Image (cartoon, rainbow, N blue to C red):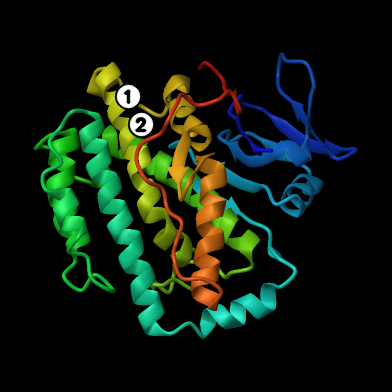
């Protein structure tokens, strides 16, 4: 079963736990009960929200990822279980001892998959892929030529226009991309913890202040799904009206988790596919496998209705 993604944004929401159920109290609404085992990702976008300590204890014990958003509606913090797998210590030791050649090969696979996904995004919108397929074939172990950056220089103008610049601090397209990436990153980190790996020990990302370096590594081939959704939103509404204040925009970005995609020889919802990728990454880093299972192509069908939004209209 796919864990539900639930967002709470009604001002004054109060969350507590009773009999393994999340109790949701919102002003001018009836009390709601949600079985905790049904939850995969919980997003709280309400600066006035209050909680009991048991909320965090029960959600993390169930393996649920909890995102707390700031006043800009972007995730400001992430809560993950500390214990993720019964063989956690053994796997983490193997991860730490992973050799540089293996890490470089993993990074090569991730970047090659990312660039091919970017090419698929452009093709989906009937835009020439700007030679991205050929660029992907030039990615070598560790990507020493930084083909990833070369691809980005071709990709973003083709997707969102010549004037677009990827800037995390800018509004509009960038704010939507930030939100989508943050949600996917959280689910990637959750999947990595579930495999018994340490999310802070990356194969390429190494920022000492970043506790999710490995999650950022595995995030790369999933980023284009967010780009695809943002482009859809951009095609449906004027740029000046695009804001995370709108319930419909957040809903469209969150629904990515339930889109069906190809991975390996199967089709799975993104939320499940991320776990499949994390399992294959664990095998690659601990000597139990070679090939990574990564997304291939665009979503196959419309998202299901597993995303639940409790959002204020104001």
Q: Is residue 199 visible?
A: no
Give the residue drawn at x 28%, y 73%.
Answer: 142
Q: Toward which corner of the image does residue 52 lie, by quadrant?
A: top right
Q: Are marks 2 and 1 in contact (CB under 8 Å)?
A: yes
Judge by depth and name the residue closer to the eye, 81 or 265.
265
Judge by depth and name the residue closer to the eye, 104 or 226.
104
Q: Is residue 24 visible?
A: yes
Q: Toward which corner of the image does residue 25 lie, by quadrant?
A: top right
Say what secondary structure mark 2 lies in: helix
In this rendering, the answer to whether 84 lies above or below 285 is: above
- Within 10 Å of disc 1 (Cα), the crowding (few <14, some 14-19, many 20+) is some
Name the residue carrying label 2: 229
Give the residue drawn at x 31%, y 38%.
Answer: 227
Say what secondary structure mark 1 lies in: helix
34 relative position to 211: left or right: right
The Cα atoms of the two marked residues, 2 and 1, are separated by 6 Å
Q: Residue furthest front?
A: 265
Name the residue carrying label 1: 233
Q: Position of residue 276 (x, y in %)?
A: 55, 53
Q: Position of residue 240 (x, y in %)?
A: 24, 22
Judge by depth and name the residue closer to the eye, 254 or 210.
254
Q: Position of residue 234 (x, y in %)?
A: 27, 25
65 relative position to 104: left or right: right
Q: Toward which corner of the image does residue 197 lie, by quadrant?
A: bottom right
Give the residue drawn at x 73%, y 15%.
Answer: 29
Instruction: Name the quadrant of the N terminus.
Output: top right
310 relative position to 227: left or right: right
Q: Position of residue 104 (x, y in %)?
A: 34, 75
């Amino acid at each position: 079963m796919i864990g539900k993604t639930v967002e709470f944004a009604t001002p004054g929401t109060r969350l507590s736990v009773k009999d393994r159920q999340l109790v949701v109290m919102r002003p001018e609404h009836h009390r709601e009960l949600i079985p905790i085992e049904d939850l995969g990702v919980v997003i709280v976008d309400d600066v006035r929200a209050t909680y009991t300590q048991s909320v965090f204890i029960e959600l993390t014990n169930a393996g649920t990822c909890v995102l707390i958003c700031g006043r800009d509606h972007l995730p400001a913090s992430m809560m993950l279980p500390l214990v993720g797998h019964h063989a956690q210590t053994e796997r983490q030791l193997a991860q730490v001892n992973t050799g540089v050649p293996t890490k470089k090969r993993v990074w090569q696979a991730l970047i090659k998959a990312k660039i091919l996904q970017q090419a698929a995004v452009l093709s989906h919108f009937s835009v020439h892929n700007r030679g991205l397929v050929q660029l992907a074939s030039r990615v070598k172990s560790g990507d020493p030529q930084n083909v990833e950056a070369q691809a980005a220089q071709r990709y973003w103008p083709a997707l969102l226009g010549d004037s677009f610049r990827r800037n995390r601090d800018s509004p509009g397209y960038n704010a939507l991309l930030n939100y989508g990436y943050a949600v996917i990153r959280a689910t990637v980190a959750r999947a990595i913890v579930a495999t018994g790996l340490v999310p802070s020990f990356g194969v390429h990302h190494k920022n000492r202040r970043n506790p999710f370096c490995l999650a950022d590594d595995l995030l790369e081939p999933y980023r284009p799904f967010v780009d695809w959704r943002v482009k859809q939103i951009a095609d449906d509404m004027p740029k000046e009206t695009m804001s995370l204040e709108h319930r419909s925009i957040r809903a469209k970005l969150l629904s990515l988790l339930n889109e069906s995609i190809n991975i390996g020889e199967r089709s799975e919802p993104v939320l499940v596919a991320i776990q499949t990728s994390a399992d294959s990454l664990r095998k690659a880093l601990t000597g139990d496998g070679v090939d990574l299972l990564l997304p291939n192509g665009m979503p196959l069908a419309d998202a299901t209705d597993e995303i639940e939004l409790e959002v204020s209209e104001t």
